[in-house]
Amino acid sequence: MDVRTKMLLKIQSENLLPKGSGGDKPSLDHKVFHHFFLTRELANVPKYIFKHLIKSLEDSQTIKKNFVPYGRLLSEIFHQIGVLDALKNVNCFTDAQLGTVTGRIINGATMVTMKLIKKEDHQELSTDLKESSVISNLMDDFPPICKQDPLEVRVMFIKEYYELTGQVIKISDIPDEMYGGALPISRNRKSLKRKLTEAEYLDATPEFAAKVAKTSAPESHPPASDMIIPKQEALEADDSEHEDPENIVEISFGNSSSHISSDSSDLFEGTLNFIRQIDEKLQTATQSVPNKTDSVNQQTPQTSLEETPSPNYFIPLQMILPEPVVETVVTESVQVTESESPVTVTVSEPNQQQTHQTNTKQTSTSTLTPTQTQTQNSPQKAIPEPVVETVVPESVQVTESEQTVAITVSEPIQTPSQPQSTAITNDQPSSSSTIQTQQQTTPTC
Amino acid sequence: MDYFGMLNGPTYLTLVRHFLVRAQLYDQKASKLEMDEKVLINPSLEGKTRDEMGLEPFGCEEIRSSILGIPIVISVDTIAGVIRRASEGRYVFGLKNKKSS
């Protein structure tokens, strides 16, 4: 017999039809069965095994042959029938009680002992079969995940399983617990005290959404015009939690007038009158820019609402005026500069501060000659950026002047352009003398 | 090949020992003995079928045993299910060596 036949016979005599002795002298049944293997003829292996088991059973009962075949096969049958589960329920499942052992393995070393190959030719590999004590699963196609696993784990497993097999595992098919007991999930003290519900476990957003709906829903995504008002209302709502839930809902929509109390309404009217007076002054001071005052009047109600809870009525105007007003002032001033001279006006707006621009409105009556502007512009460019930004509105103040001179103010950041601007300003007085007298600018601090 | 994959696993010697000590073969011969016992107890049942004797019909050969009071019956189908292979194919039995000499 060649090596292949000997090895097949060895496997047969050890596993398929174990006889408890060497395979040197096979019986007739072993020969026939081996013949089926060599000729690749389909043999009824279960029946061969069953008949061999019966024969060994008869031998043990008649001739008292102490040989127990198919130990592993019988153990697997016990496992599949459910005997092991029954023993596990009565706490009789330890290896010592069950006498758990593992059988031998046929590998290259076996061929060395059989003297089929030389010892030098044999080399142990890392891929050699090792003894395993893993119990096989009872259920086929059982997904190795459960709802105790994190959501990301489940999603990734379902995704990979779909890529491999093309089958989709539904979330409803995932069992609550892994078969065989609970998973060793590490929990902190808080989670041990309070069990998470299914909704909390699946998605934590409902809890957050409920909190937002109760307290400060508009804080999450308020409109730009209601950035301050809802906060005050939310504070009032927190103070008066006994109010109807409808009011809370209204707060969430930003309806402010219905929730201001009578005391606060008096303060509200007083502040409105005060701000109207200020607006009138502003209108008189900046008559050349009507749109500016309109924009201020449009936004004053919002600013007045800001001051309602605060006891200090005399807040500086700088704090009351919002940003968009200032920006409109700058742009309008640029538009108003009607230059009849060939020189074009190029006003570059650096990042301006609001406070200085409001000052420019009040001090618009002061006049400056172009030489003064030159003297002011020249130090602007020598000064670093933050200081120059405050001065830039001065050049913008040309708005009310009827002059024909155009002023070019380069960006203070661009220091190389400094000589160019100075050159232009030097040319202005020489070109036209009327320009010097009629120009009116407003110096600012 | 599932059979060889199944072989690499734990073997419970105690359970196997309990099983084989009490194992009995239940075949055609054992079924006849069972019927004879019924007739000896009640001679009026002689010549009647198993159903009339109150016995279960004989299906196939089985190995009957018990482990810690749990009845276990092993048949060809049981083994075929464990090794994940149908009980099909050729089976040759009853051969005897014909020695010419």
Image: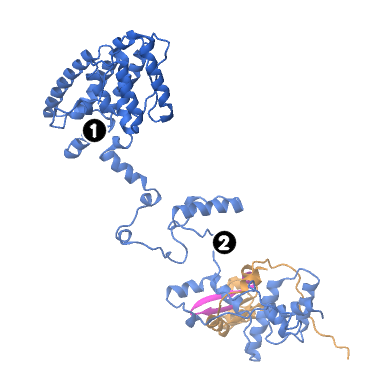
Magenta run includes residue A164 = no
On the image, the x and y values in percent for residue B84 come to: 64, 66
Q: Chain of mark 1?
A: A
Residue segment shown in magenta: B64-79
Residue B81: mark in rendering: none
Residue at (71% x, 85% y) in the render: A113
Q: Which color has been applied to chain B in this rendered view? A: orange
Q: Chain of mark 2?
A: A
Where is A212 relative to A253, above or below? below
Q: Residues within 10 Å of mark 1 (few under 14, many from 20)?
A: few
Amino acid carrying mark 2 in the image:
Asp
Mark 1 lies on a secondary structure that is helix
Where is A185 relative to A98, above or below? above
Evaluate whether residue A241 shows in this view. Answer: no
Q: Are marks 2 and 1 on the same chain?
A: yes
Residue at (27% x, 33% y) in the render: A252
Amino acid carrying mark 1 in the image:
Glu
- Classify the position of the N terminus of chain A by image quarter: bottom right
Q: Which residue is mark 2?
A: A140
* Image side of residue A11 versus residue A352, left or right: right
Where is A216 relative to A8, above or below? above
**Which colour style is shown?**
by chain
Residue in front for this viewpoint, A252 or A138: A252
On the image, the x and y values in percent for residue A407 come to: 37, 17
Q: Which residue is mark 1?
A: A246
> Gap in Å between the C-alphas at discs 2 and 1?
56 Å
